[in-house]
Amino acid sequence: MRLLYRGVCLLCIIMTFLIRSSIVRWRCKNEISKNSALAAIVHHYTKKILKLFRVNVSVTGSSELSNNAPCLIVSNHLSYLDVLMLTSVKPTIFLSHKGIEREPVIGTIVSGGGTIFLDKSAKTKLSGEMRHLSDMLKDGNTMTIFPEGGTGDGEGVRTFHPALIEAAVRAGTPVLPVCLQYSRINGESVTKENKDLIFIYGDTPFLPHIWKIFKKLDNLDVTVKVFDKIPVYGANRKAIAIQAREKIAGEFIPV
């Protein structure tokens, strides 16, 4: 009975979200404004989903997420749920690789939310994409990247790839490091034994993993630790990436 109730509620949330996002995408012709409006819609519906699954997100540290100044958020990456955690506390536009766009179900949902998909294999397009991302930051949008390049297993924070940080450098927009820490799953501390309910890494198939979360997740506690912004003036993307990773790795508690 609980699964049926949860399923009906989740379906209603997703369908309502897709309808509203479709209206925005149809009405708004300016891409920058469109993605900003979609980020606000995602922020609204994400909070509903987290409430349905009894997910508690605590924000600690700097108050930078509470103001409206644009920034490029960089975060460690452990699960597809990371997107929900971050967008629940701040309307933001996510950057992802084109492979996600082709995933069944999730591709439709994240596309509807205004995610920008980058073709990392086409280096000839990189310059144009970087100008586009820089323009969005200049226009006042907050964007989020996971510079590890993929999800990890919770044993540490991997090397940050600096390429996309170049957009913030060009725009003169500060970089905001945040550390995601999953602390309790179903009332128990996150350990090597239970982490795979939430973390997704390696060759874990997406849809079976999401189904497992749907069936087995009763509650979840997550902390988002926010650091002070890193100014980009006079700095290069590699130095910024190293500094951001050091802050996050210094706070992250390995599983």
Image (cartoon, helix red, strand yellow):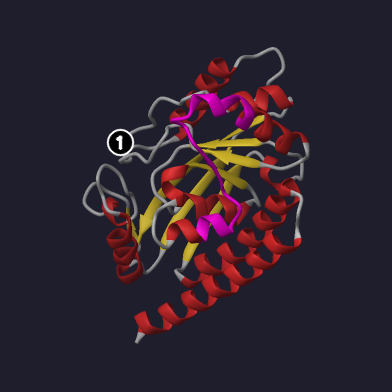
The extreme top residue here reads 234
Question: Which residue is labeled 1 in the image?
Answer: 155
As drawn, 15 above or below 4: above
Give the residues drawn in magenta, as a range.
109-129
Give the residue displayed 48% in from the left and 24% down from the top. Answer: 246
User: 239 or 16: which is nearer to us?
Assistant: 16
User: 159 or 15: which is nearer to us?
Assistant: 15
As drawn, 255 above or below 88: above
Q: Within the image, what quadrant is residue 21 found in?
A: bottom right
User: 38 or 252: which is nearer to us?
Assistant: 38
Whether 122 is among the magenta residues is yes
Element assignment for label 1 = loop
* 17 with respect to 212 (left or right): right
Amino acid at circle 1: Glu
Callout 1 crowding tier (Cα within 10 Å): few <14, some 14–19, many ≥20:
few
Q: Position of residue 215 (x, y in %)?
A: 31, 71
The extreme left residue here reads 193
Q: Within the image, what quadrant is residue 158 found in?
A: top left
Q: Quadrant location of the C terminus?
A: top left
Q: Position of residue 41 (x, y in %)?
A: 66, 62
The extreme bottom residue here reads 1
Q: Quadrant location of the N terminus?
A: bottom left
Q: Position of residue 126 (x, y in %)?
A: 56, 27
- How many numbered marks, from 0 up? 1
Whether 48 is among the magenta residues is no
Q: Position of residue 133 (x, y in %)?
A: 65, 34
As drawn, 207 above or below 244: below
Give the residue displayed 43% in from the left and 48% down from the top. Answer: 100
Give the residue displayed 34% in from the left and 37% down from the top. Answer: 254
As drawn, 31 above or below 220: above
